[in-house]
Amino acid sequence: MSSKKYVYLFEEGNAGMKNLLGGKGANLAEMTKIGLPVPPGLIVTTEACKDFTAQGQQFPAGLKEQIRNGVAQLEKKTGKRFGDEANPLLVSVRSGAPVSMPGMMDTVLNLGLNDRTAEALASATGDERFALDCYRRFINMFGDVVMGVEHHKFESILACQKDKVRICLDNQLSAGDWREVIAEYKKLIQKETGRLFPQEPMEQLFMAVHAVFNSWNNDRACVYRRINKIPDDLGTAVNIQVMVFGNLGNDSGTGVAFTRNPSTGENKLYGEYLINAQGEDVVAGIRTPQPIEALQQDMPEIYSQFAEMCGLLSRHYRDMQDIEFTVERGKLWILQTRSGKRTAQAAIKIAVDMVDEGLITREEAVLRVEPGQLDQLLHRRIDSGAKLNIIAKGLPASPGAASGVVVFDADEAERLNAEGKKNILVRVETTPDDIHGIVASQGVLTSRGGMTSHAAVVARGMGKPCVCGCESISIDYEKNIFSIEDLVVRKGDIISVDGSTGNVILGEVPMLDPELSSEFKQLLEWADQIRTLGVRANADTPQDAAKSREFGAEGIGLTRTEHMFMAQDRLPIVQEMILSTSTAERQAALDKLLPMQQGDFYGILKAMDGLPVTIRLLDPPLHEFLPNAEELLVELTRLRLTEGSKAEIEKKEELLRKVRALSELNPMLGHRGCRLGITFPEIYAMQARAIFLATAQLVKEGFNPVPEVEIPLVIDLNELSFLRQIIVAEADKVIKETGISFHYTVGTMIEIPRAALLADELAQAADFFSFGTNDLTQTTLGFSRDDAEGKFIQAYQDRKILSENPFMVLDRKGVGKLMKWTVEQGRKTTPDLLIGICGEHGGEPSSIEFCQEIGLDYVSCSPFRVPIARLAAARAALINKD
């Protein structure tokens, strides 16, 4: 026999034993300890589950004996005996993992009933119908949950019996009716499983424990753990508890209540109950429950006791509690308590209110609210009560929801927006060419691309909903339709997209506007007092910059200048620059762009007056600013077939030649970033001059601009030094020309492994480093992010090769190791080197925690994630407190 203790009575445990006894068991033990009326019981530990799994789904040695001994203790306490024909002991069996796990095994009630004990229960209660109702419920639950007979087959038998006697409700069936139902249930089990329904109570109990352990690895539980990032090795406990009955008459009942409203956070009891019912009746919807307030009229003394116990539990656990209770013949029993699930709005209000009530500290309040929950409050969202016609599902790439008419072209989106018509831009994928269409649309839907694709990144920056990688839709630009199997959606049809879930919905749906409460603002103020990590925003326009500042950003960590090049009034000039055949021609085009860029930088620097603005010089390959080669070829063919003008044909042919000459087999690793500055120094010189002219102008006007000039995709000190000289030379020229002095810094992005490895050298020519983790992840893992997310990342997660999508959650083992090395080596050269992160990971809570651990100075994220980053940074500071 094993010496390991696998079974604990409730009085042997406490709330601190959650990992061993599971959340439910630890709370039952704690409530027993503080003297609440809890039906006695025992807990089979998570260790037993882990050993069961390790031994090939076999009970470990000694477990059955310990369960028998535990049941003997329950018999002693209750004066009842398991399987006794005069006074039978009945128990409930529930799963209970260390963390809340919907999707685990359903509850089994009334275990211990059989043909003989059902008659004994009838005699003991004087109610044959009640006893047989309990027995048929048990056979149904046990047959479904433990023996694997589908629930609907039991429901079908019950429905037939009600039809036969011409009644509608279960509670109208007589004892004789229940006997017939029970006989049919037992026949069904024998037919489906090839074995008789077990009559021996201890056999029933062992089978139920076995089923709970097996449920730890059922499909539902595995999916839930993966989605909620719960480890697979925790195991589940089993709670075996003496039954109390809420269906013994009008002095009995059952219910569920929250100590505060889980939707709003209001400090008021919230819940419902049923008179003369068992627990599952509340959930099943067979009868309409009453609001918990009505219990005050029906059973005033019970309500008073229950309200007092709710207050006690709320104060004891210092959190909002979700409580299950049963009243058996005028006596109140508490069956379960746990921290209640709540909306983001409620989580914030409860946390702030509990600080005001003296129950928790400000630090605890910050730790009570999950940063990711704030997304619900910062964007429009679909009314949870709405009926939805969901036609497809993609990746939830940018939160929020929107409705509008379908458009397939960015120009069309812009035209409709000018007319005041809401639209959803639908594309196979977006490119910088589509920026104006994204600006003009309410939301974006793409059939390709991942969570860090162009559409996702741009939409998040603008605070627009986006669903990416929706591979089930087939887009036909020629016909202006997209289809999902037999369903065809045409241009002009109305759809809705939910960027928080990835759902694509046919038609318009009711929306709820975001509301930021006073409690929300208070919580973020506390977070700002706690955090040590700075929070900046990624912003490309003065409007984005202003929104960032409104959300509490302490600067701009990334301004992408390529987005400015895509404006419709300057794209022809950019193309003129690209198609130039000489330096003189190129410079002429750059001279036209200079005042435009100066205006761009002036607006952003002014909006962030007094705060740093990191401006990344041109990064993408030049061919992204030119027309698509395939579209050009189609246009050329059309001109030739329709005898278009010779001059236009020659112009298109020359353009096609240039596009093909600039095209690359792997553009993400091609002629982009600082490589453009090396081959065409005049481009970076123009951008630097524009930045410094805007800076000088603002200083002259009395503002305090703080420009940080950032060079992308650097791999070597010589490269960085060459480009830094160009930037410094332009600054010196502007200072000399204007007579105005100003402060600026020059730094680099770290987005290539070689740059990370040579951080000590790069720090010699850099005033700051900024991790571009989107590209650093691609180049470290060798993954093309759009292809990886669409084709194999999910398989890698399913097979536990990767625990997370590395483009959503920072890869600490690989990318993180390079980042840590960069920080150490860079600060070895320059101890006060400013280091931040501007990739999408800068707004993801787990990644922010890692940034705190390795000593970064700031994180930068899209404007609408700034509040999330502020809260996550505070939590990271508390978690990593020395």
Image: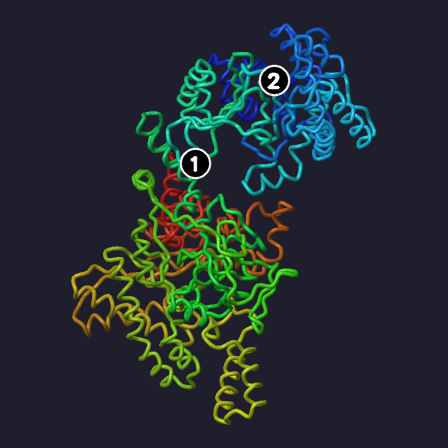
Residue 72: which disc?
A: none
Q: Which residue corresponds to mark 2?
A: 241
Q: How many marks?
A: 2
Expressed as whole percent of the image width and height from the top left, the position of residue 759 reads: 42, 56
> Considering depth in this image, is 474 or 480 the residue closer to the camera?
480
Mark 2 falls on what kind of element? strand
Expressed as whole percent of the image width and height from the top left, the position of residue 551 reads: 32, 50
Residue at horizontal 56%, vertical 52%?
389
> Considering depth in this image, is 379 or 168 the residue closer to the camera?
168
Mark 1 falls on what kind of element? loop
> Considering depth in this image, is 32 or 759 the residue closer to the camera?
32
- Please say if 832 is above or below 638: above
Whole-number angstrom distance, CA of label 2 to CA of label 1: 31 Å
Q: Quadrant of the N terminus?
A: top right
Outermost residue toward the front in this view:
166
Residue at horizontal 16%, vertical 66%?
700
Residue 619 visible within the image = no
Outermost residue toward the bottom in this view:
646
Q: What's the residue type where badge 1 is placed?
A: Ser
Q: Quadrant of residue 665?
A: bottom right
Badge 2 vs badge 1, beta-carbon distance below 8 Å = no
The 10 Å Cα crowd at callout 1, few under 14, some 14 to 19, many 20 or more, is: some
Q: Quadrant of the C terminus?
A: top left
Q: What's the residue type where badge 2 is placed?
A: Gln
Q: Which residue corresponds to mark 1?
A: 263
